[in-house]
Structures are given as C-alpha cells and as structure tokens.
Image (spheres, rainbow, N blue to C red):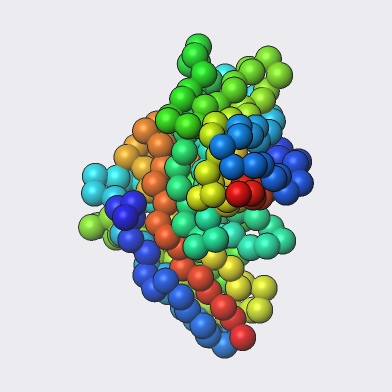
C-alpha cells in the first residue's frame, strides 16, 4: 500500500521569503512518481511539479523545486520568493507502478503568505 | 482552463435522491479517475476507467457507480444520497493507463446533500 504523510500544521511565511512544505511517503514499488498540487480557496487542483523515482536531479518549475531524498523517502516542496497568491492548500501525492497508478494524496498543508 | 470539464459545478439535492456527475477528459486522454474530497476523509480515490473499461477501484460505496462512454466522457452516479456524501468530487484524466505523463484535474463538482 502507498502512503503519503503531511504532518505540518498550518504554515505561515512572509511575502518574498522561501518556505518548505514537508512530505514523506511509503511504497514498496521501485518505480513511482511524486506530485505536488495546489488547491486555492476556489477549489481547483493545480499541478505544480513532478519527480520520478529514477530522476537523479531534483525537479524545478519556476519558483517551485522539489527536494527529493529517496533514501529518506521524502519529497519536500520548496517555494521561493513567496507571493500572496501562493496562499492555498498544498497536497503531496504519489503514483505507484502497475495497479497502483492512481494518485494517493496526503492530507494537505495550508500555507498562508503574510504581506 | 485545464482541459478537463466537469458539470455541474454545484449541485444541491435532498437525502435519498440520485445525481449524475459528468466529466469530459482532456483531448487525447484515455484514462479517467474520480476522487471525493471531504473535510474528514481528505482526497479519496473512487474509481478509474481506461478507454471505456474499469481498471481500478478504491473506496467507492456500492451506492455509487461510474462508467466511461465511447467518446471517453465519464459519469459518476450517486444514489440514495446521505448527508455524508456532501463533498467536492473531482475528475482527473491522463493520457495513458498508468498516468506516466501526469494527471489533469477538472474544477470539481461541489455536491451538497440537505
């Protein structure tokens, strides 16, 4: 079974500062993918970044980067230069191999950016 | 616009009723996934279809059913509705069976059972 753990309580960050959102995962699959999604108050799920289990380099997408530590089974999201529009719920998710291709989500972390 | 279309956006209905939620996947995507998001359960996977066939089942109640049609749109049917079924229902699509190229979510259908 796959499991995603996000245990941070609501996070606060000052505008223009960087913030790290934690995510640990558990799987017995050798091949898997890790995703981060943003859900603003309007409700839609917005894809942010993807990391494959065999990718040697950490993924980056603009202000988002994924700190992938395979041995520790962690996939933390780093948001640089936070903006007010970054205030939202953030979900870490993973996709396993074969029959585990569905996305399994963590419980999410609420991020509030202060001006 | 993500390319995944869900209708309706909002639905209010009474207990015991039956509703149908509709999802049109992104052009070219063959896989459709349904998720339920509630405050207490978080995002729960319900069911996956690929090119018209059911491929994976999650925590889907017997009162719920789904199908994917030849034009690849999918419908999620919820019957004998209870107050606890109130949630945000998401559809996501992917190009392949195993989501190799990622998943695109629709904007969701917010169901309120009163």
Q: Is residue A52 above or below residue B2?
A: above
**Image quadrant in which you'd find residue A18:** top right
The percent coordinates of residue B45 (x first, y second) are: 56, 52
| Quadrant of residue B68 within the rendered picture | bottom left
A20 on left or right of B8: right
Residue A5 placement (x, y as % from top left) = 71, 38
Visible residue check, residue B25: no
> What is the total number of numbered labels drawn onto the structure image?
0
Against A25, residue A11 (above or below) is below
Considering only vertical position in the picture, is B77 above or below A21? below
Identify which residue is drawn at 24% across, 57% down: B70
Quadrant of res A70: top right
x, y percent for residue A21: 65, 36
Looking at the image, the residue that sits furthest to the front is A115
Q: Is residue B96 left or right of residue B27?
A: right
Q: Nearer the viewer, residue A100 or B22?
A: B22
The N terminus of chain A lies in quadrant: top right
Please report the residue visible at 46 percent of the width from the left and 68 percent of the height from the top.
Answer: B109
Name the side, left or right, on which B54 lies relative to A115: left
Give percent across and percent down for residue A3: 68, 37
- The correct choice, above or below, for A1 with respect to B109 in the image is above
Q: Residue at x 64, y 79 (%)?
A: B82
Q: Which residue is at a point 57% across and 78% down the rendered structure image?
A: B112
Q: Is residue B21 visible?
A: yes
């Amino acid at each position: 079974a796959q499991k995603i753990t996000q245990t941070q309580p609501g996070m606060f960050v000052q505008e223009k500062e960087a913030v790290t959102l934690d995510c640990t995962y558990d799987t017995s699959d050798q091949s898997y993918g890790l995703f981060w999604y943003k859900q603003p108050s309007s409700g839609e799920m917005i894809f942010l970044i993807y990391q494959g289990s065999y990718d040697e380099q950490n993924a980056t997408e603009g202000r988002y980067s994924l700190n992938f530590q395979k041995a520790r089974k962690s996939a933390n999201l780093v948001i640089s230069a936070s903006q007010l529009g970054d205030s939202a719920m953030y979900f870490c998710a993973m996709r396993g191999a074969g029959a585990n291709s569905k996305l399994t989500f963590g419980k999410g972390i609420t991020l509030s950016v202060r001006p | 616009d993500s390319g995944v279309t869900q209708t309706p956006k909002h639905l209010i209905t009474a207990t015991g009723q039956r509703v149908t939620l509709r999802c049109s996947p992104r052009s070219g995507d063959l896989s459709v996934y349904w998720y339920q998001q509630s405050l207490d359960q978080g995002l729960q996977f319900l069911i996956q279809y690929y090119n018209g066939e059911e491929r994976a089942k999650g925590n889907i109640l017997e009162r719920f059913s789904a199908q994917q049609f030849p034009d690849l749109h999918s419908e999620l049917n919820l019957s004998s509705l209870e107050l606890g079924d109130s949630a945000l229902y998401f559809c996501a699509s992917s190009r392949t069976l195993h989501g190799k190229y990622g998943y695109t979510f629709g904007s969701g259908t917010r169901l309120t059972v009163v």
